[in-house]
C-alpha cells in the first residue's frame, strides 16, 4: 500500500545525495528513505581504484518511489521490464498505458508515462478508444488473470480479433491477488485457493484457460508469446519479448500479446524463491513457455524501413 | 577459506563488477541471492526503515553479470563493471559523506531501537 | 443554414458530425440503430472514428478511453443498453471526463418493448450507476432539439468535465421532421489533463477515479458536489407555454410535452386556463421556476410515460403549496390529448366537490 512517505521521496531523492549534510533537516525525521544508500560492506580498496561503467540501472522512466507490491512480486519486475523497453526505444513521450483493476491498479504511480485507469476487465476497450484516435502512439494494456480472462474476456477477444495495434501484457499468476487469493480462470487443477479450498475441481470449474493458445487462433493476433520471469535467463527472454511486442506496434499488423507467468508469493503462501521453483515445476506444465505465434519474415522486413 | 580464494581470484580477474543497493527500497525477497552465481549477496541482520532485512553485497566477488539486477523486482540494484577495453568513467561516484550519513543514521536513536527489535 | 427532412436519430447523428465529434462507439439496439448506421456511413468521409463495439459495455469503455485522451466522443443506446453502461458512466463521472451519451428510451423494465417510454428518468437523473455523481440530462422533444442538443451537450460536457446524457425516446428518435443545421459551431477546448503522451515539460497525466485514501476521496467528492451546485445555478433550461395567466399547470418533458401542448390548447378552447412547463434540463431540474409557478396554480398535473418518476421532483419543487397530480401510461402506450384533458377536468371537479 502506498504510504504518505512516498510523496516525499519523489524529487528529492537524487538531489539530496550531494547536499551538504550539516544543513540537512530531513535526516532526523525520516532516516533512510531520502538517501540513495550505498552498500554496507567493509572497505574495498581494490574496487575503488578501477574505472567502472554502469551496465544496469533502474530505468529513468520509472517514478522513483517504493512500490507497494509484496516482496518478490512479479508485477514490480514486469513494470521494470516494460519501462526499460520504453526507455530503450525512447518512446516515453508517445506511450500511453492502461492500468487494470487488480494489484497493478496503482501502476500509474510507478510508470512515468501518461496512463489511464480502466474499469475491471475493460482495459482492452479503453485502449481501443485511445489507439483508434491516436494511431501513431504506442498504447499498451497491463492486465491480470481476472481482468483479462474472466470479466474482460469478451473485450480481449474482440480487441484481438479486430487486430487493434496495441500491446497486451498479460500477467498470469493463477490467482486473484488483490482480493486475497481467489481462484482465477488460469488456476491450476488441484490448486488450493480461497474459493477452491479443496483444490480446483475440473468437474465444477473446468480446466485452466490457456489464453495465449486461445487467442493465437485469431487472425488479428500478430505476435503471441508466453514467458516467465523467475530466473535471470527467463527475465532476459521476457524483456526481449516485450521489446519486440512494442516494436511490432509500428507495423500496424495486429495485436501483440505477451503472457508472463508471474508469481504471487503472498497468496501462494510461499517465499519468493519457493514461488520461482513452483513456476518451474508446476506452472510450466500447464502453461508451456515459448513463442506461440510468430510474425512472418516478410512482415518483419518492414520493421527496418519503419525504424 | 573458500571465500578468500575466490576473493583473490576475483581481484586477479580482468573484468570486475560492483553493485549499489538501495537498501531503503529492498524488501529482502532474496531472489537476487539465488540468482548470483558467485554467492556474493547475503541478507543483512538489521532491518531497514520499512522493516525488511535487506541485501548486502560482497563486491570483491562481483563479476558484474547483472543477473541480480535483472531478477530484482524492485529495481534497487545498480550494477557497475570494469571494461578492460574502454576507459569509461564511473558514473554515480559515491561520495564519502554518504558513508558518513549512513554511519550517522545507523547510530541514531531511531535506528538503534529498530535494530534492537526482536524479529524472526 | 440548410433545412432537411430527417429522422430524429439521423438528425442527431448529423449534428454529431457537425459538432466535431471525433469518435463514436456504439452497439445496435432498437430504436436507435440508425445513429450507428448513419455515422458508419458518414464519419469515415471526414476521417473520424466510428466503431461498432462488441457490446454496450465495450462501447462506454471505449468512450472512456477516447475522452481521457482529450477527444470528443459519444455513444448512444436504448434503455437495456444504458443499464449495461452504468458502471462505465460512473467511472467517467468519477474521473471527470467529458462525453455525450444518448438514451433513446424504450418501455421496460427488462427487455420490454421497442415503443417509447419515459421509465429511465430515475436512472438518468438520480444516478443510475454507483456513487455520488450526477449527469447533465437534456430532454429533447423535437427532431430539431435532437440536433441542437448535441452541440449544447458537447459544450456543457467540456465546460464542466462531466458526462452529458440526452434523454430522448423511441418516438422522437423515429419521427421525421424539418431540421435546420448551421446555427451552432463546434467549440474546441484545451485539455491539458488528457493522456496524449508525456512530454518532458510536464508531469505525467493519469486518468483515474481511484482515490484509495478516504481523505482524498472525500475532497474529490466535495469537488464534484461543488461542481453540481454550480451546474444547478447556471444551466437550468425550460420552456413555458401560456403560463402567464394559467390556473392549472401541466408538467411534462420530451414526447409527453408535445401531447400536453395539444391538450392544453384543447383545454383552453374549453375555457380552462392551462399552461405547460417543459423542463429541458432534467438535471438540473427547474425546481425554482416550478415553485414560483405553483403560487398561481390550483392544480399541477404531471404527465409521463411511466408509473410516476418526474412527479416526485415536481412534488419536491412545489413543496406542498398545491396538489400535484399524476397521469401516466405504461408499456409503450401513448395518451391522447383528450385523455389528459379529461383527467384534468376530473381533478378540477373533484377539487370543487371538496
Image (cartoon, helix red, strand yellow):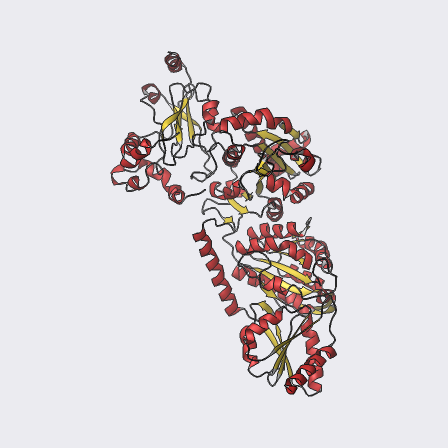
Which one is in front, C311 or C6?
C311
Q: Is residue C183 above or below residue B31?
A: below
The x and y percentages for residue A219 are 71, 37
Task: Kindly give the residue lying farthest to the left in the view shown.
Answer: A22
B20 vs C63, left or right, is: left
Tell me, yes or no, if residue C150 can be seen here.
Answer: no
The x and y percentages for residue C170 are 72, 64
Q: Is residue C218 above or below residue C240?
A: above
Which one is in front, A184 or A68?
A184
Q: In this view, does A154 lie above or below A302?
A: below
Task: Kindly give the residue lying farthest to the front in the view shown.
Answer: A198
Q: Residue at x 64, y 33 (%)?
A: A224
Q: Which residue is drawn at 44% across and 18% down?
A: B38
In which quadrant of the rendered view does residue C74 lie?
A: bottom right
The x and y percentages for residue C126 are 58, 63
> Total number of numbered labels?
0
Quadrant that contains the C terminus of chain C: bottom right
The x and y percentages for residue C135 are 57, 61
A252 vs B101, left or right, is: right
Quadrant that contains the N terminus of chain C: bottom right
Which one is in front, A162 or A28?
A28
Tell me, yes or no, if residue C314 can be seen here.
Answer: yes
Amino acid at each position: 500500500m502506498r504510504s504518505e512517505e512516498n510523496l516525499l521521496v519523489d524529487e528529492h531523492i537524487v538531489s539530496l545525495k550531494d547536499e551538504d549534510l550539516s544543513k540537512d533537516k530531513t535526516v532526523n525525521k525520516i532516516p533512510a528513505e531520502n538517501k540513495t544508500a550505498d552498500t554496507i560492506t567493509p572497505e574495498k580498496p581494490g574496487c575503488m581504484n578501477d574505472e567502472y561503467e554502469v551496465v544496469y540501472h533502474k530505468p529513468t522512466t520509472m517514478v522513483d518511489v517504493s512500490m507497494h507490491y509484496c516482496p518478490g512480486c512479479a508485477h514490480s519486475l514486469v513494470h521494470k521490464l516494460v519501462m526499460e523497453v520504453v526507455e530503450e526505444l525512447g518512446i516515453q513521450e508517445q506511450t500511453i498505458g492502461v492500468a487494470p483493476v487488480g494489484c497493478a491498479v496503482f501502476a500509474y504511480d510507478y510508470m512515468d508515462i501518461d496512463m489511464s485507469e480502466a474499469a475491471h476487465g475493460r482495459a482492452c476497450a479503453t485502449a481501443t478508444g485511445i489507439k483508434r484516435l491516436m494511431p501513431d502512439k504506442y498504447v499498451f494494456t497491463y492486465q491480470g488473470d481476472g481482468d483479462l480472462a474472466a470479466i474482460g474476456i469478451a473485450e480481449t477477444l474482440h480487441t484481438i480479433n479486430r487486430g487493434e495495434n496495441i500491446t497486451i501484457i498479460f500477467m498470469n499468476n493463477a490467482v486473484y491477488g488483490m482480493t486475497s487469493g481467489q481462484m482465477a480462470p488460469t488456476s491450476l487443477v488441484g490448486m488450493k485457493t480461497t474459493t477452491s479450498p479443496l483444490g480446483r475441481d475440473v468437474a465444477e470449474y473446468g480446466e485452466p484457460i490457456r489464453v495465449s493458445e486461445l487467442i493465437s487462433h485469431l487472425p488479428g493476433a500478430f505476435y503471441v508469446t508466453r514467458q516467465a520471469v523467475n530466473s535471470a535467463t527467463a527475465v532476459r527472454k521476457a524483456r526481449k519479448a516485450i521489446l519486440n511486442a512494442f516494436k511490432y506496434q509500428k507495423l500496424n499488423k495486429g495485436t501483440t500479446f505477451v503472457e508472463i507467468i508471474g508469481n504471487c508469493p503472498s497468496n501462494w503462501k510461499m517465499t519468493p524463491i519457493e514461488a520461482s521453483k513452483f513456476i518451474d515445476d508446476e506452472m510450466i506444465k500447464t502453461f508451456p513457455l515459448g513463442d506461440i505465434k510468430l510474425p512472418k519474415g516478410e512482415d518483419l522486413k518492414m520493421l527496418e524501413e519503419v525504424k | 577459506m573458500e571465500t578468500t580464494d575466490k576473493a583473490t581470484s576475483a581481484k586477479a580477474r580482468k573484468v570486475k563488477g560492483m553493485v549499489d543497493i538501495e537498501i531503503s527500497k529492498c524488501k529482502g525477497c532474496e531472489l537476487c541471492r539465488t540468482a548470483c552465481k558467485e554467492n556474493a549477496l547475503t541478507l543483512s541482520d538489521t532491518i531497514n526503515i520499512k522493516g525488511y532485512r535487506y541485501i548486502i553485497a560482497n563486491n570483491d566477488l562481483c563479476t558484474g553479470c547483472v543477473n541480480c539486477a535483472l531478477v530484482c523486482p524492485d529495481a534497487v540494484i545498480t550494477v557497475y563493471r570494469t571494461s578492460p577495453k574502454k576507459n569509461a568513467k564511473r558514473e554515480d561516484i559515491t561520495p564519502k559523506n554518504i558513508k558518513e550519513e549512513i554511519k550517522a543514521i545507523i547510530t541514531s536513536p531511531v535506528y538503534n531501537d529498530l535494530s534492537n527489535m526482536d524479529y524472526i | 443554414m440548410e433545412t432537411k427532412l430527417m429522422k430524429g436519430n439521423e438528425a442527431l447523428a448529423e449534428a454529431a458530425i457537425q459538432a466535431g465529434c471525433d469518435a463514436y462507439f456504439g452497439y445496435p439496439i432498437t430504436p436507435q440503430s440508425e445513429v450507428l448506421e448513419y455515422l458508419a456511413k458518414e464519419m469515415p468521409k471526414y476521417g473520424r472514428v466510428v466503431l461498432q463495439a462488441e457490446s454496450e459495455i465495450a462501447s462506454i469503455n471505449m468512450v472512456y478511453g477516447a475522452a481521457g485522451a482529450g477527444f470528443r466522443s459519444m455513444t448512444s443506446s436504448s434503455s437495456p443498453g444504458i443499464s449495461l453502461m452504468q458502471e462505465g458512466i460512473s467511472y467517467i463521472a468519477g474521473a471527470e471526463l467529458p462525453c455525450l451519451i444518448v438514451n433513446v428510451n424504450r418501455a421496460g423494465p427488462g427487455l420490454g418493448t421497442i415503443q417509447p417510454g419515459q421509465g429511465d428518468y430515475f436512472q438518468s437523473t438520480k444516478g443510475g450507476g454507483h456513487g455520488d455523481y450526477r449527469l447533465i440530462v437534456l430532454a429533447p422533444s423535437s427532431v430539431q432539439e435532437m440536433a441542437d442538443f448535441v452541440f449544447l451537450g458537447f459544450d456543457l460536457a467540456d465546460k464542466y468535465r462531466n458526462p452529458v446524457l440526452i434523454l430522448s425516446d423511441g418516438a422522437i428518435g423515429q419521427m421525421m421532421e424539418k431540421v435546420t443545421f448551421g446555427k451552432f459551431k463546434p467549440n474546441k477546448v484545451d485539455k491539458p489533463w488528457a493522456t496524449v503522451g508525456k512530454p518532458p515539460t510536464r508531469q505525467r497525466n493519469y486518468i483515474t477515479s481511484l482515490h484509495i485514501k478516504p481523505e482524498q476521496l472525500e475532497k474529490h467528492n466535495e469537488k464534484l458536489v461543488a461542481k453540481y451546485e454550480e451546474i444547478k445555478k447556471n444551466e437550468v433550461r425550460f420552456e413555458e407555454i401560456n403560463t402567464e395567466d394559467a390556473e392549472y399547470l401541466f408538467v411534462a418533458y420530451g414526447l409527453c410535452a408535445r401531447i400536453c401542448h395539444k391538450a392544453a390548447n384543447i383545454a383552453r378552447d374549453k375555457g380552462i386556463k392551462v399552461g405547460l412547463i417543459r423542463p429541458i434540463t432534467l438535471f438540473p431540474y427547474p425546481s425554482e421556476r416550478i415553485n414560483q409557478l405553483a403560487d398561481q396554480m390550483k392544480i399541477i398535473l404531471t404527465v409521463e410515460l411511466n408509473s410516476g418518476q418526474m412527479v416526485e421532483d415536481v412534488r419536491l419543487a412545489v413543496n406542498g403549496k398545491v396538489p400535484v397530480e399524476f397521469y401516466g401510461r405504461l408499456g409503450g402506450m401513448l395518451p391522447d390529448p383528450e385523455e389528459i384533458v379529461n383527467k384534468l377536468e376530473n381533478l378540477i371537479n373533484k377539487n370543487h366537490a371538496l
